[in-house]
Image: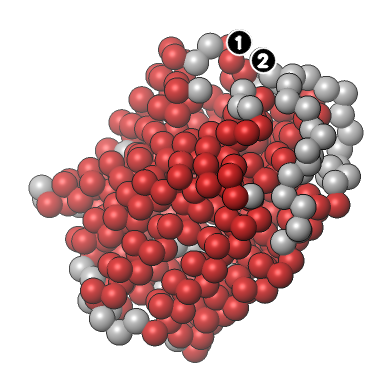
Amino acid sequence: MLALGVVSLFNDIAGDMIQPLLPAFVGAVGGGPQALGLIEGIADATASPLQLGSGYLADRVGRLKAATTAGYAVAAIARPLLALTQTWWQILGARFADRVGKGIRTAPRDALLADATPIASRGRAYGFHRAMDNAGAIVGPAAAWLMLAGGLSMREVFAWSAVPGLLTLVILQTMVSDAAFGGSKHDVSVGLPPSLPYRRLLGAIFVFTLGCSSDAFLLWRAAELGIANSLAPILWMVLSAVKSATSTWGGALSDRAGRRKVIVAGWAVYAATYLGFAFANAGWQIWLLFVVYGTFFGLTEGTEAAMVIDLVEPQWRGRALGAYHAVVGIAALPASVMFGVIYQAAGPMAAFSTGAGLAIAAIALLPRQARTEHVAQP
């Protein structure tokens, strides 16, 4: 488990050397909010069908180290290629390839965490894994900022992202054994788990994600209110630090207080923060909002995955997680595209208020049942 956490750490270092610079880079090659929304929406949606397939394979034949390695390898190759792009649609191509890798690896990895974790500490385990991801998202922007401060261009920063990407593959191959990916194997059929609470959870998450546009728009908003492009990596690092600091705590809180209560709290924080971005009129407010926004992730990222596992039988875990990630990805495309269109046509207040409204609507759809008590621990 520790080795997989280190793998995620370096993978996120590579990804987050790029992410905070992307809005400015899209603008530099002639793209606007609509182009950014299309790039991020398609990138997020790309992984959806692949996550369904990888989730099925996780249930059918167990966790596959080769597939996981392939997923990380695709991302490690795609990210540095951004250094060669000249148009926003070429950026889209590189981001598309990056997300293909995510689609291949996510469901088997998350199912493995479920198999190895007692139900009483499941939320904490998923929260810790997210904390490792977010720790990488602190180091990545810091590295990017130091490179920019040292005189490197954004393209050169993108090229250097190949180094932590390569380390991800080396650690995966040398520190994670094939046996760790053995997992339980089941005779399975294609389809969603029959659990009604689980399906209601997917419906609520779909509605919430429709209002959850790419975080790249938060950086766009920050630039509008006077935050310099050179400070974007620092702002991103602040957000990631809050995520990392609160993720293990948020997951553990869901073990004690219940998944639904913690998700409701997180989605309410999201709605309030988006309203804050809608009405913000000074740069200092952006820094504060990014801090508050980070607690939303700490409360929800590990908790949602844990609730998915709670609501299904063990033989459905891979498909349940695959469908969960797929629903998020499918909704992400219209979410970011819609947000970009509204932002460009009616301004930030209308766009951010729409996102806040959908978050409140999603809370009402969450299932009351927070745990399937009869599910046996494997």
Near-viewer residue (100 or 209): 209
Near-viewer residue (268 or 109): 268
Q: Residue at x 49, y 62 (%)?
A: 214
The kind of residue tagged 2 is: Gly
Q: CA distance from mark 2 to mark 1?
A: 5 Å
> x%, y% of residue 255?
59, 42
The kind of residue tagged 1 is: Ala
> x%, y% of residue 356?
55, 75
Residue assigned mark 1: 179
Tell me: 142 left or right of 364.
left
Near-viewer residue (266 or 34): 266
Residue assigned mark 2: 182
Q: Residue furthest left?
A: 150
Tell me: 238 left or right of 127.
left
Q: Residue furthest bottom?
A: 346
Say whether marks 2 and 1 touch (CB < 8 Å): yes
User: In the image, is residue 167 above or below residue 239?
Assistant: above
Q: Is residue 39 visible?
A: no
Near-viewer residue (358 or 92): 358
User: In the image, is residue 311 above or below residue 265?
Assistant: above
Q: Residue at x 41, y 19 (%)?
A: 171
> x%, y% of residue 147?
17, 46
Report which quarter residue 122 is drawn in: top right
Specify the quadrant that holds the C terminus.
top right
Circle 1 crowding by C-alpha within 10 Å: few under 14, some 14–19, many from 20: few
Q: Is residue 247 visible?
A: yes
Tell me: 198 left or right of 298.
right
> What colouring style does the render use?
secondary structure
Circle 2 crowding by C-alpha within 10 Å: few under 14, some 14–19, many from 20: some
Give the secondary structure at mark 1.
helix
User: In the image, is residue 36 above or below residue 344?
Assistant: above
Tell me: 364 left or right of 189.
left
